Amino acid sequence: MTDFTQLYAEKKTTAEELAARVGDGWLIGMDAAAAHTPDIMSAIARRATDGALRGVKVQTLLDVYPLEFYADKSLFGKLTGVSWFSSGGARRAINGGYADFIPAYYRDIPGIIRRDYEYDAFCVAVSPMDRHGYFSLATTSSYSCAMMEKAKRIFIEVNDRQPRAVCGTQIHISAVDGLIESNRELPVLPPAKLDEVSIAIGSLIAEQIPDGACIQLGIGAIPDA
């Protein structure tokens, strides 16, 4: 059996070194929520703040980390966030005019990516490598396959707090262009504040759910209610 630990060691580096590989005008893709790579993004943001980068765009979905390009309007035009689906940070930045969004149905995103986009890098957080050299995309892989197909490079953050999803998308170490280790806690969204309208809607929906049902819940006050 091949020992992939040597290949892992060769590709392991720092967030600063990965950020140093990023060039002007790059398009970087990330999947949703806990699949984001906050350490790599922070290192890229520092380069942009220092004036070393211009015209870099990062596509996100459902931002849950405090990503700098959604918090610092001075980064606009240097490192700009582009959201497929917005949480609070992206929504404030878009409304403030220093971020952009792509209107799309969630189900259509992989097809749009394959048809319309080429990525200079795809960045994703993963669970630790197994003995066969594979990383699990863990919590999220909604359109990761499409982005990986259209990406020139794959940068990963290996996090031992990310769960291993054996039935989900995986990446082999041979396909990775650079990796860092970042064992940070995964983000947890605070409970939504329930109002009378949300409670009323939630109650009406709950009455229609039979015993033994399998349901899919979204995010926000009505699903919580």
Image: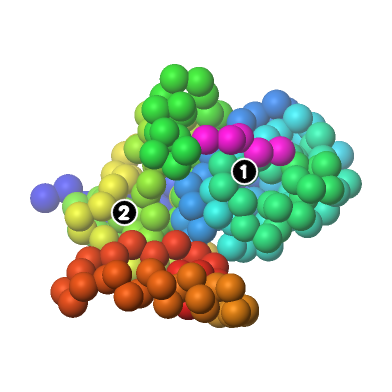
- Residue 195 vs 170, above or below: the answer is below
Badge number at residue 135: 2
Label 2 vs 1, first from the N-terminus: 1
- Residue 48 vs 137, above or below: the answer is above
Instruction: Name the residue rendered at 35%, 54% in the picture.
Output: 137
Residue 45: x, y in percent?
74, 49
Residue 211: x, y in percent?
18, 77
- Residue 157 vs 80, above or below: the answer is below
Camera-side residue: 34 or 160? 34
Camera-side residue: 221 or 198? 198
What span is colored magenta in the figure? 100-104
Coloring scheme used? rainbow
Magenta stretch: residue 51 in it? no
Residue 175: x, y in percent?
35, 37
Residue 130 falls in which quadrant of the image? Answer: bottom left
Instruction: Name the residue rendered at 60%, 79% in the picture.
Output: 196
Residue 212: x, y in percent?
16, 74
Say what amino acid the circle numbered 1 marks. Answer: Ser
Q: Is residue 122 visible?
A: yes
Magenta stretch: residue 103 in it? yes
Graded by Cα atoms within 10 Å as few (under 14), some (14 to 19) or many (20 or more), the crowding at tag 1 reads: many
Disc 1: which residue:
83
